[in-house]
Image (tube, rainbow, N blue to C red):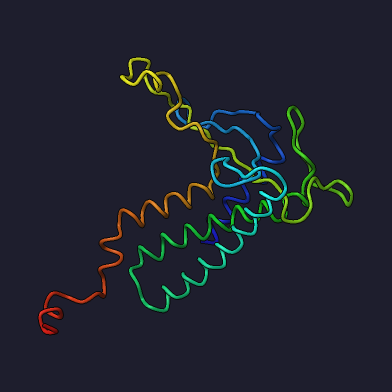
Amino acid sequence: MIPLIVCDQALKVWIKLNFSVGQRASFVPGILELQFIENEGMAFGWALPGVAGKLVLTVFRLLAAVGIGFYLNKLIRSGVHKGLLTCVSFVWAGAIGNIIDSAVYGQLFTRSSWGMMADWAGPSEAYAPFLMGNVVDMFHFIVRWPMSFPIDSLAGREIFPPIWNLADAAISCGVIAILLGQRAFFSEGGPTEEDKDQTL
C-alpha cells in the first residue's frame, strides 16, 4: 500500500511542478498520454459544484478512508483471503492518495493555470485553504472507436475520455477485482456442504 501511495504522490508532484494545465506529452504512443488537469471532486474528474460541494466530497473521502481502514484491520484479524486484503488495500491506498491532494496541495503549491506551471508555495502564495486543494490528474486514453463502428454516436469518439491518476486506477482495479473474485474471496472459511448436512 505504501509504495502505491508514494508512486501516486511522486507522479502528481512531478506533474504539478512540470506541466501547465492542459499540457500534454506522449506516454504510450497511440494509447495513453499525459495531460495535466486538476479537479475539485471525485475520481475521473467528476465533482459536486461550489465550495460546499468540495467540502462534502473531502469530508466524505476522509470518512470513507477511516471506514476502509477499520474494515481492512478487521479483515486482517479474521484471516480472510489474501486476494481480498490486496484489493481492499488498493482501494484504501487510492482513497488516501486523493485525500492528500485535497488536504494539502492547496497549501503546498501555487496555482496551476493554462501556460503557467505551479511552484512550491511561500507563506502567502498558497492557492487554497486546508482541505480545499484540487486533485491532480494526468492519464488520458487516446484510443478511439473506429469510424466504421456500428453505433453512430460512438464512431470516432474516445473509448474512455476521463482523465485520471494512479489513485483512481488503484480504486477502480481494487473494486473490479473484488467483484470478479468474490466467489473465491467470500466462500473461503464458510460452511461446507458436509457441515450443512450435519445441521439438518
Instruction: Please tell me in which quadrant of the rendered image residue 55 appears.
Output: bottom right
Q: Residue at x 57, y 47 (%)?
A: 42
Q: Residue at x 63, y 56 (%)?
A: 99
Quadrant for the C terminus in the image? bottom left
Residue at the far top in the pictured view:
148
Question: From what the image shows, is residue 190 above or below residue 31?
Answer: below
Q: Locate residue 166, reporting x and y percent.
A: 53, 47
Closer to the camera, 191 or 57? 57
Picture coordinates of residue 73, whole percent (x, y): 48, 74
In the depicted structure, whether residue 47 falls above or below residue 22: below
User: Residue 85's image quarter?
Assistant: bottom left
The residue that appears at 73% across and 28% down in the rendered structure is 114
Which residue is found at the position 71% from the left and 32% from the top? Answer: 20
Compared across the picture, whether 64 is left or right of 118 comes to left
- 187 vs 118, nearest the viewer: 187
Report whether 83 appears left or right of 189. Answer: right
x%, y% of residue 120? 79, 46
Residue 71 lies, with reference to residue 114, above or below; the image says: below
Number of numbered discs: 0
Left or right of residue 130: residue 69: left
Task: Measuring from the top left, give residue 177's x and y in whole percent.
Answer: 36, 54
Q: Nearer the viewer, residue 183 or 167?
A: 183
